Image (spheres, rainbow, N blue to C red):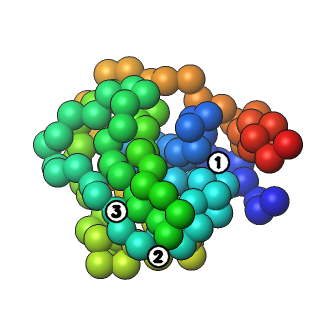
Amino acid sequence: MSHTPADLRYAASHEWIKNEDGLSVIGLTDFAQSSLGDIVFIDLPQVGDPVTVGESFADVESVKAVSGVFSPVSGTVAAVNDALLDNPALLNEKPYEAWLIKVSDVSEVGDLLDAAAYDAVCKSEEA
């Protein structure tokens, strides 16, 4: 199992989140990208779109399947990582650097896990 960064928080649905300059930055965890396999396409929301805790805001398509990406917060999309549209494989290569969206005006935060608790979720899913 890869190293799970301790400075991030995690949703049980395999998204990571960090606060940066007043925004919530959201990405896909290493466990998620390795479970999906080679990512070939991503569908991201537009700047200004609302996101809601527990609801899908993006679709990630791999050679295996199409999977929704679920928001760990409610708020407004402030930025989208356009680099992923041209090169979705960045999610496989650098999952903790290849953020998906940045969210402003966060009004609600879902249940977030620290690295140790998230690792326990991953271990239970591997079993």
Q: Amino acid at mark 1?
A: Asp
* Place of residue 62 in the rendered image (x, y in percent of width and height, measured from the top left): 47, 65
Please report the residue visible at 77 percent of the width from the left and 62 percent of the height from the top.
Answer: 2
Kindly indicate whether the residue at mark 3 contacts the one at mark 2 (C-beta within 8 angstroms).
no
Residue topped by disc 3: 42
Please report the residue visible at 60 percent of the width from the left and 54 percent of the height from the top.
Answer: 32
Residue 119 visible within the image: no
Q: Is residue 55 left or right of residue 93?
A: left
- Nearer-N-terminus badge (2/1): 1
Please report the residue visible at 59 percent of the width from the left and 29 percent of the height from the top.
Answer: 112
Numbered disc in front, either 3 or 1: 3
Bin the neighbour count of mark 3 within 10 Å (Cα to Cα): few under 14, some 14-19, many 20 and up: many
- Nearer-N-terminus badge (2/3): 3
Residue 93 visible within the image: yes
Q: Is residue 96 left or right of residue 51?
A: right
Tell me how far mark 2 sits from mark 1, CA to CA.
Answer: 24 Å
* Place of residue 102 in the rendered image (x, y in percent of width and height, measured from the top left): 33, 49
Q: Nearer the viewer, residue 33 or 71?
A: 33
The quarter of the picture where residue 14 lies is top right
Residue topped by disc 1: 7
* Place of residue 48 in the rendered image (x, y in percent of width and height, measured from the top left): 14, 43
- Nearer-N-terminus badge (3/1): 1
Residue topped by disc 2: 89
Q: Secondary structure at mark 1?
A: loop
Kindly indicate whether the residue at mark 1 contacts the one at mark 3 (C-beta within 8 angstroms).
no
Quarter placement of the N terminus = bottom right
Bin the neighbour count of mark 1 within 10 Å (Cα to Cα): few under 14, some 14-19, many 20 and up: few
Tell me how far mark 3 sits from mark 1, CA to CA.
Answer: 26 Å
Tell me how far mark 2 sits from mark 3, CA to CA.
Answer: 10 Å
Q: Residue furthest front?
A: 64
Q: Amino acid at mark 2?
A: Ala
